[in-house]
Image: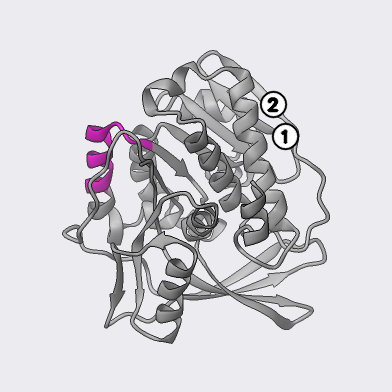
């Protein structure tokens, strides 16, 4: 049976509007994606850790309640669970304040056996920092052997711009190990001072990874392949919160990949029609999340698929 395996950090997102807390939701970029996939009934597994405290116990319960396998999810005795404050503006866009220690996990931490039917989702600072690198490199080596589809969401925040020079070799290594790289125009403006998807692909991605998806909020989504470029429009939406929008685009895209039973060897030959279906499903997931204060799709939306 096909599985989606995600790895990343976990964090309790506390949302504020007009300086008042309005919601507290377990989150984290890949965590948000895997919760949505678990709600669709997709066999899902999450690799990561949290503190062995109240927030951590709520997090692991949340995984299980949403159908996500937590066998490889660790609760650390000497770790405090991470918290973020997300201040929503009048457009539903969030400014964050994070309260956490840098990610760290032993390279000897147990990992699952990967197969060619699986999809691995990873990304963000968790995927490139020193404290997780040996562990992640080990996983990427196993997925390469197994011919697992690897989907990398760059998600490079401005708060890490000062580390860019140090992190760049690792970011490039992640590109090289990935079958699909997804990033936002904001990510690449921070990294390269570029927002144009075609320029970004040609100058910075194509030599490492053939398939690239560039999103730009409510703007066009551009798919770049060796055969050419495709632009797709984004549905208009009355936004409550943009927290989790990109994460759920990833979830919807991967959900469509698994439903269409696409495996790694088939990716280079995908038609424009199939790409359109994958992008549309990603947009549907993201749109649903933007209309709520939650980080993942609702169970009602999942049941309607």
For the residues labelled 2 and 1, the Cα–Cα distance comes to 6 Å
Where does the N terminus fall, quadrant-wise? top left
Main SS of residues in magenta: helix
Q: Is residue 148 magenta?
A: yes
Residue 77 image point, x, y percent: 27, 82
> For this rendering, which residue is in front, 90 or 287?
287
Q: Residue at x 62, y 19 (%)?
A: 272
Say which mark, if any, is on residue 220. Answer: 1
Image height check: is 221 above or below 283?
A: above
Judge left or right: residue 179 versus residue 212: left
Q: Which quarter of the figure has residue 235? A: top right
Instruction: Bin the neighbour count of mark 1 within 10 Å (Cα to Cα): few under 14, some 14-19, many 20 and up.
Output: some
Say which mark, if any, is on residue 231. Answer: 2
Q: Is residue 205 magenta?
A: no
Answer with mark 2 or mark 1, whichever residue precedes in sequence: 1
SS state under label 1: loop
SS state under label 2: strand
Image height check: is 149 above or below 239?
A: above
Query: Where are the magenta residues, as a range?
Result: 137-149
Q: Confirm or deny contact between disc 2 and disc 1 (CB under 8 A).
A: yes
Give the farthest residue toward the left. Answer: 108
Residue 207 image point, x, y percent: 41, 23
Q: Which quarter of the figure has residue 264? A: top left
Say which mark, if any, is on residue 57. Answer: none
> For this rendering, which residue is in front, 11 or 295?
295
Query: Can the viewer see residue 284 in this picture?
Result: yes
Q: Residue at x 52, y 50 (%)?
A: 155
Q: Residue at x 83, y 55 (%)?
A: 238
Residue 55 image point, x, y percent: 45, 81
């Amino acid at each position: 049976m096909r599985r989606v395996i995600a790895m990343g950090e976990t964090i309790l997102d506390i949302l504020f509007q007009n300086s008042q807390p309005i919601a507290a939701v377990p989150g984290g970029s890949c965590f948000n994606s895997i919760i949505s996939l678990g709600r669709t009934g997709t066999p899902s597994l999450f690799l990561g850790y949290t503190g062995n405290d109240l927030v951590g116990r709520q997090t692991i319960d949340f995984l299980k309640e949403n159908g996500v396998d937590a066998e490889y999810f660790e609760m650390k005795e000497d770790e405090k669970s991470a918290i973020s404050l997300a201040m929503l503006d009048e457009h539903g866009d969030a400014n964050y304040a994070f309260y956490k220690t840098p990610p760290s996990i032993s390279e000897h931490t147990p990992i699952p056996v990967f197969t060619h039917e699986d999809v691995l989702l990873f990304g963000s600072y968790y995927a490139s920092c020193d404290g997780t690198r040996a562990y992640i490199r080990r996983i990427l080596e196993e997925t390469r052997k197994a011919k697992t589809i690897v989907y990398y969401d760059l998600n490079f925040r401005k708060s890490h711009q000062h580390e860019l020079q140090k992190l760049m070799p690792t970011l490039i290594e992640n590109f090289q190990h990935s079958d699909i790289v997804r990033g936002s125009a904001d990510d690449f403006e921070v990294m390269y001072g570029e927002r144009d998807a075609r320029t970004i692909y040609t100058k910075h991605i194509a030599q490492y990874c053939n398939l690239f998806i560039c999103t730009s909020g409510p703007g066009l989504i551009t798919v770049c392949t060796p055969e050419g470029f495709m632009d797709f429009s984004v549905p208009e939406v009355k936004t409550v919160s943009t927290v989790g929008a990109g994460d759920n685009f990833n979830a919807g895209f991967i959900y469509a990949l698994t439903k269409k039973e696409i495996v790694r060897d088939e990716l280079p030959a995908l038609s424009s029609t199939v790409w359109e279906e994958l992008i549309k499903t990603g947009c549907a997931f993201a749109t649903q999340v933007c209309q709520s204060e939650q980080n993942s799709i609702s169970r009602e939306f999942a049941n309607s698929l």
